[in-house]
Image (cartoon, helix red, strand yellow):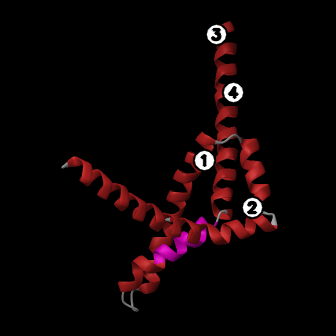
Amino acid sequence: MKKVVLGLILFLAVQVQAQEKSALQTKSEELIKLTGAGKAFEDAIAQIGAGVGADKKEAYKKEAEGTLVEIYDKLGALYAEEFTEEEIDSLISFYHTDLGKKLSIKQLLISQKAMMIGQSWGMKVGGIAQKYAQ
């Protein structure tokens, strides 16, 4: 009898933990969308599908947008691994502020510019490394 009760308690504990992770995952996905990633994904789908003919554009868009569920799931799991539910809640609250909304709009542009700066820096350091490699 003790084994049955203990097993039931363990089972219920696992179920509760799975539900908590699910709630955290859902909140993480909401956060990702608030950060402006949704717009970035939409832009990427449009850019990648630029060569698709007009007669197949709607079918392409529908299928490509269907992949968003998977990427949101994967990114949501990633955020859920790195942040607590309270931290995700705080970030969601931040992205609902005026500053958070501004950041979500500007973040992609800032990231693109930062990548260009990083590439330029990497080439410069590469040149320095080549000078000393000879």
- Indicate the secondary structure of the residue bearing disc 3: helix
46 sits to left or right of 107: left
What residue does disc 3 label? 3
Does the magenta segment cover residue 43?
yes
Kindly report which numbered mark, 4 or 3, lies closer to the viewer in this rendering.
4
Kindly report which numbered mark, 1 or 3, lies closer to the viewer in this rendering.
1
Label ID, residue 12: 4
- Indicate the secondary structure of the residue bearing disc 1: helix
> Mark 2 or mark 1, which is nearer the start of the sequence?
1
What residue does disc 1 label? 79
> Mark 3 or mark 1, which is nearer the start of the sequence?
3
In percent of the image, x 25 and y 53: which residue is there? 131
Relative image position of residue 35 (x, y in whole percent): 65, 63
Q: Residues within 10 Å of mark 2 (few under 14, many from 20)?
A: many
Q: Residues within 10 Å of mark 3 (few under 14, many from 20)?
A: few
- Vertical comparison of 30 with 77: above or below: below
Count how many numbered circles sit on residues in the image.
4
* Secondary structure mostly seen in the magenta stretch: helix
What residue does disc 2 label? 95
Q: Which residues are magenta?
A: 36-45
Kindly report which numbered mark, 3 or 2, lies closer to the viewer in this rendering.
2
- Vertical comparison of 130 with 84: above or below: below
Callout 4 amino acid: Leu
